[in-house]
Amino acid sequence: YLPSLGGMGIKKAHGFVHRYKTTKKILRGVRFDASFKIPKNYESSFHRARLAFRHQRVFNGLAGDPNVSMVCLNPLPDDIDAKSVDFIGPILDPAIAKEIAQGNLNPLTKKEISLPARKTIKQLPLAPAFNEFKLLKEP
């Protein structure tokens, strides 16, 4: 979703979360910490990544309406237009979405996935049940 910041490990990240609590304050704290070099557009990229993670479009095979199959994992906030966030996943035709979800279409090319024919494997005989073994007694 987003490249990590150099020098930011799990321990330092936990410290920032514990200290600043909210995303906005954490980003401000990291920006003012001299040990990190933050790219110009990091905050906007962070917010896009967060939207993509929380609200990614997924296939809903249980949707009652056959014309609706792509839904957001979590509802988008009211101030965000669903058409303006194409980075959370494309809005697909329901028939195409279903074929992709079933593994019949390549999600990138939308072309049929053709798998090689399966080889049949000769089934080996099963081992006899435990009680059919002859137990050896020591002399």
Image (cartoon, rainbow, N blue to C red):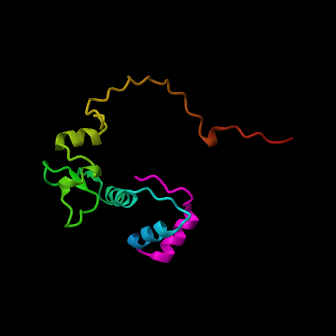
> Would residue 5 be found to the left or right of residue 118 on screen?
right
Res 134 → quadrant: top right
Residue at 44 percent of width and 22 percent of height: 119
> Would residue 32 be found to the left or right of residue 110 on screen?
right
Task: Give the quarter of the figure containing the C terminus.
Answer: top right
Q: Which residues are magenta?
A: 1-22
> Would residue 75 be found to the left or right of residue 49 on screen?
left
Query: Considering only vertical position in the picture, is 72 above or below 95?
Result: below
Residue at 57 percent of width and 59 percent of height: 7
Q: Percent x, y for residue 38? A: 46, 59
Residue at 20 percent of width and 47 percent of height: 91
Q: Percent x, y for residue 55? A: 29, 58
Magenta highlight on residue 35: no
Query: Considering only vertical position in the picture, is 117 above or below 47?
Result: above
Residue at 54 percent of width and 71 percent of height: 15
> Would residue 108 be found to the left or right of residue 10 on screen?
left
Q: Residue furthest right?
A: 139
Q: Percent x, y for residue 49? A: 36, 56
In the depicted view, which residue is nearer to us: 52 or 40?
40
In the depicted view, which residue is nearer to us: 84 or 74?
84
Q: Percent x, y for residue 39? A: 43, 56
Count the numbered circles shown.
Answer: 0
In the depicted view, which residue is nearer to us: 11 or 134?
11
In the depicted view, which residue is nearer to us: 40 or 54?
40
